[in-house]
Image: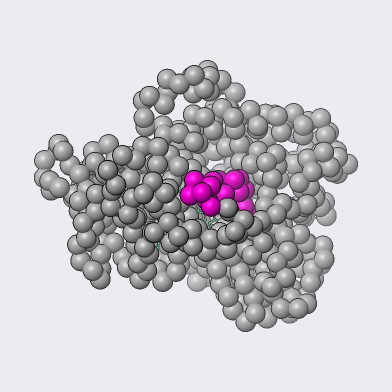
Amino acid sequence: MKKSCAVIGSGIAGLAAAIRIASKGNAVDVYETNNYPGGKMKELNKEGFRFDMGPSIFMLPNLVDELFEICNKNPRDYFSYSSLEIPFKYFFEDGLVINAYSDVERYGREIESKTKDSKLAFDNYRKDIETKYKITNEVFIENSLHVATNFINRRTVNGLRNFHKIGAFKSMNDGNKSFFKDPHLVQLLNSYAAYIGSNPFVAPATLNVIQHLEINLGSYIPEKGIYSIVKALVKLAEDMGVKFYYNTTVEEIIITPQTGLKNKKVTGIKTNNSGVKNYDRVISNMDIYYTFKKLLPNEKQPERILNQPKSSSVISFFWGINKKFEDLAIHNMLFSADDEGEFKSIFEEKTVTDDPTIYISISSKHIKEDAPEGCENWFLFITVSNDQGQNWDELTKLARKNIISKINRILKTDIEKYIVFEDYMTPPMIEKNYSSPFGAVYGNSSNDKFASFFRHSNFSKKIKGLYFVGGSVHPGAGIPMCLNSAKIMEKVFS
Ligand SMILES: Cc1cc2nc3c(=O)[nH]c(=O)nc-3n(C[C@H](O)[C@H](O)[C@H](O)COP(=O)(O)OP(=O)(O)OC[C@H]3O[C@@H](n4cnc5c(N)ncnc54)[C@H](O)[C@@H]3O)c2cc1C
């Protein structure tokens, strides 16, 4: 029977969930606090510059295409993307520059010519991360960890049998060091921990699967920027009959019966501007922490999950630059000379280091309309602690000063004189803009080896008709994982 369904939040996972459920003929309404869709996938248009303010690295585009395909639409009628020849350029303080070519043979030769490690070591590493991905994909990434029958199919049993190969009991850093001796390369590969807001000296080597997505499967750029994915998905959702309600905050998920332990089910939601509305099913794309604390305060709270340490955050800057930097690629990383010290400052001291690793994304190198003629749109950030009440005004000033001096040092420039537009974002702003607890960018941190088991399932075992998608629940954060959360949710939706 067709169901009426409310989706709370229009982040990438909320959009994917709405499309999947609508594609089955259900009636879907999406409620969004903000006046725009996309959540962290937000864009900024100012003074001739366009910036993607959240994700800039686009992997596994097939997961986006799939949403169009299940609706019998051609994804290319909605948006297009291409792969990058040099997705990343890595800069080190001692002057070394490594080009991460998408052609892995060429990348291997680059490593052999510029580091102490061989192409063969790189090839072996690539095979290892592919194996890790294949094992974890079956067990964790595309399936629910919370449905017992998932553990008795042949491929999952095979995955579990190979569990020892995923490196759950050593750190990402130790995993990387077991393949490479050159500290530059180890630091480069450790930096992928930042993609999930975690510390490579603690987080399990299993997470080196992220490198597989980028190095082996490739990095892509949507022709009109990351935000064009959001626009395309909203258009697809609307074509499938989904209705969007912006500037509308869901304040409560209504559960019946209100008391008693058995036979609980969702019956609707209450919003700030249209009161109670009845629905058969509710899918929350709000962070799981606030879903329970704010929308389900009277229900038993899954404290163990909610109290897990949260991931790191970022201080980001959006700079309109009136010069072209030919030495930079679309994605660039300027590494700290002391990576261990940097992670200590983020996760233990919870402050800003003097010598931060800086990520700089310049989409205008590919998308000419993103900056005026002769200019570039720099979106840059450093990883910082999530919000623990630090003085962010002071830390942002300090971060800006340290970032400028490092850019000047490495790129041999005087960057401040080229900044013609500037905006910024801090952890408290991330919390406010996207309802992300503590301004954490990626939900719970993945520093614990069992973190995967401490993410909430994509459905409620106690409340019938209640589902969860997004970066704070299984299987985790980042565009691909969020899309998978919606895919898993659809598998258990009934
Ligand atoms: C600076 C930065 C860089 C990143 N870089 C990358 C990258 O390069 N590649 C990558 O893959 N990922 C990246 N990420 C991570 C990625 O952006 C997120 O994992 C993903 O976008 C989260 O999507 P989500 O579906 O969980 O929803 P979110 O984006 O968290 O959105 C949730 C939405 O729900 C709405 N909402 C919340 N509560 C309510 C309520 N009660 N009522 C109505 N609406 C509500 C919010 O307003 C918001 O719009 C980055 C993130 C940031 C911030």
- Please indicate whether residue 321 sits to the left or right of residue 446 in the image: right
Q: Is residue 342 magenta?
A: no
> Closer to the camera, 251 or 229?
229
* Quadrant into which the N terminus falls: top left
Q: Position of residue 281 (x, y in %)?
A: 27, 48
Q: Is residue 415 above or below residue 209?
A: below
Residue 227 position in % (x across, y down): 56, 63
Point out residue 80 in the picture as x, y percentages from the top left corner.
Answer: 64, 57
Q: Is residue 481 above or below residue 421?
A: above
Instruction: Look at the image and say whether residue 69 sits in the magenta stretch.
Output: yes
Which residues are drawn in magenta? Answer: 57-73
* Left or right: 477, with 300 as reference point: right
Q: Quadrant of residue 60?
A: top right
Q: Is residue 242 above or below residue 21?
A: below
Q: Is residue 160 left or right of residue 100?
A: left
Residue 87 location (% of width, % of height)? 73, 52
Asked whether residue 118 is in view, the answer is: yes
Q: In the rendered view, would you say 312 is above or below 366? A: above
Camera-side residue: 64 or 122? 64
Q: Residue at x 36, y 49 (%)?
A: 25
